[in-house]
Image (cartoon, rainbow, N blue to C red):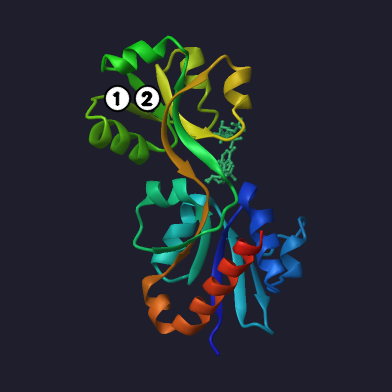
Amino acid sequence: MRYLTFALTKGRLAKKTLDMLERLGITCEEMKDKDSRKLIFVNEELGLKFFLAKGPDVPTYVEYGAADIGVVGKDTIIEEGRKVHEVLDLGFGKCRMCVCGYEEAAEKLKHHELIRVATKYPNIAKDYFYNKKHQTVEIVKLNGSIELAPIVGLSEVIVDIVETGSTLKENGLVVLEEVCPLSARMIVNPVSMRMENDRIKELITNLRNLLREE
Ligand SMILES: Nc1ncnc2c1ncn2[C@@H]1O[C@H](COP(=O)(O)OP(=O)(O)OP(=O)(O)O)[C@@H](O)[C@H]1O
Ligand SMILES: O=P(O)(O)OC[C@H]1O[C@H](OP(=O)(O)OP(=O)(O)O)[C@H](O)[C@@H]1O
């Protein structure tokens, strides 16, 4: 039996992903060791391999077949636009992609003024403003702490993830428009989906049943 390889997202989604797999009886004790510098983990018994990667790299590993299966946020799937099959909404990591800013920016948005939009997600922001709203904007790519942009005057608005809303609140910002809801998804390499159809289908079915029980 060949190994099935999982690319899992580091950071926020990691613990919930491992908990979910554990509830299916898929364990990888070694992976929980926070001090370890080891990158790839093997469950010999089940014929599975796992590695943790930065979110945006997960669809890349899956598209190229270096991983058969990935767990990653919907935001990253849309932004990266890789050729992968999205097979399951895992129901955790729920948040929203939103246009945010100071309350005053609402008027500028409404009147389609030429504004700057700071974001870690330039493709999502472009698609939203150009294709959905038919509004010309200037997109400024940032890599983190996006809420800073309107505060320091880099941009009028941001396109970013909102979960509890506390980052916005603590900085006097508000949600102006919602782009789309988000959550963690399971993705599969299209060739693996055909070649390992039985094993992958069984995994999807088991996960679906587990999600139904919750
Ligand atoms: N409050 C949140 N902020 C950001 N991402 C969230 C939040 N809640 C859920 N998510 C989901 O978790 C995924 C990973 O988030 P995480 O914070 O680990 O990565 P990141 O902030 O994009 O990466 P890094 O910290 O390496 O820049 C996101 O892509 C998103 O789908
Ligand atoms: O609505 P909330 O619950 O406050 O969560 C949303 C915040 O969390 C994320 O940032 P993160 O902590 O990943 O830091 P970063 O901006 O440096 O990526 C996101 O970019 C928002 O800033």
The picture places residue 31, in percent across and down from the top left corner, at 71, 64
Q: Quadrant location of residue 194?
A: bottom left
Q: Is residue 200 above or below residue 33?
A: below
- In the displayed structure, does residue 139 sit left or right of residue 212? left
- The response on whether ligand 2 sits within 8 Å of label 1 is no
Residue at position x 45%, y 45% from top?
Answer: 75
Between residue 15 and residue 146, name the one nearer to us: 15
Task: Give the numbered dot on residue 7.
Answer: none
Quadrant position of the N terminus in the picture: bottom right
Q: Residues within 10 Å of mark 2 (few under 14, many from 20)?
A: many
Q: Quadrant location of residue 22?
A: bottom right
Q: Residues within 10 Å of mark 1 (few under 14, many from 20)?
A: some
Tag 2's secondary structure? strand
Name the amino acid, label 1: Glu
Q: Quadrant location of residue 87?
A: bottom left
What residue is disc 2 on? Answer: 117
- In the displayed structure, does residue 115 sit left or right of residue 174? left
Between residue 120 and residue 104, name the one nearer to us: 104
Between residue 118 and residue 208, name the one nearer to us: 208
Q: Quadrant of ligand 2?
A: top right
Residue at position x 56%, y 57% from top?
Answer: 90
Q: Is residue 74 above or below residue 181?
A: below
The picture places residue 134, in percent across and down from the top left corner, at 22, 29
The picture places residue 3, in percent across and down from the top left corner, at 56, 81
The picture places residue 32, in percent across and down from the top left corner, at 75, 61
Name the amino acid, label 2: Val
Residue at position x 36%, y 57% from top?
Answer: 82
C-alpha separation, residue under disc 2 versus residue under disc 1: 6 Å
What residue is disc 1 on? Answer: 138
